[in-house]
Amino acid sequence: MNVLDAITSRAGRLAGDMQCSIKRARVEGERRMLARQHRTALEELGLRAYELAKAGDLPEAPLATEVAAVEAKLIEIEAKVAEIDRLRGDDDEPAESAGEDGGHADEHSSRADDPALAAFPMIADDPPPEDPPKS
């Protein structure tokens, strides 16, 4: 009976350890989800603060460094968009076929021309057009 009691005791401890591990994993998953929600809320707050500062509704002085950093990134994005457009111009045949696809190129380029939408895609009214599946 002594061996059976030892096995039962050990199985009980293992079950308890397993339940503790499962609970810890669940709580860690919840913590990660809350951290993602927090980052999303901060993004939205930052976007709103940037919009208010640019509109003049919020004094820009306390946020001057952050606003300048956003503006610098927007300039970098504009430069990359220009480089992409230039590279597309280098490829004669794909550029011609892109204009013949029923207007999708114009729709995409208008999104790409707006650096705010490129930097903050979550503010777009419409989702970006999906690329056709490659075969």
Image (spheres, rainbow, N blue to C red):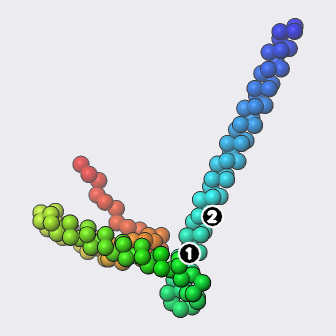
Indicate the amino acid at tag 2.
His
Regarding residue 126, the answer to whether it shows in the image is: no
At which x and y percent is residue 107? Answer: 30, 73
Residue at 48% x, 70% y: name it.
Answer: 122
For disc 1, the neighbor class at 10 Å (few under 14, some 14 to 19, many from 20) is some
Local secondary structure at mark 2: helix
Residue linked to disc 1: 46
User: Which disc, if any, is residue 38?
Assistant: 2
Residue at 36% x, 72% y: name it.
Answer: 77
Rounded to the nearest whole Å, what is the CA distance between mark 2 and mark 1?
12 Å
Q: Quadrant of residue 2?
A: top right
At which x and y percent is residue 71? Answer: 44, 79
Indicate the amino acid at tag 1.
Gly
User: Which disc, if any, is residue 6?
Assistant: none
Left or right: residue 86 compared with residue 119: left
Please tell me whether residue 48 is drawn above or below residue 43 in the rendered image. Answer: below
Regarding residue 45, the answer to whether it shows in the image is: yes
Q: Residue furthest front?
A: 65
Residue at 59% x, 75% y: name it.
Answer: 45
Please tell me whether residue 48 is drawn above or below residue 15 in the rendered image. Answer: below
Q: Residue furthest right?
A: 1
In the image, 63 versus 14, the foreground residue is 63
Q: Residue furthest bottom?
A: 56
Local secondary structure at mark 1: helix
At which x and y percent is residue 79? Answer: 31, 73
Mark 2 / mark 1, whichever is N-terminal: 2
Quarter holding the N terminus is: top right
Please tell me whether residue 126 is drawn above or below residue 33 in the rendered image. Answer: below
Q: Quadrant of residue 39?
A: bottom right
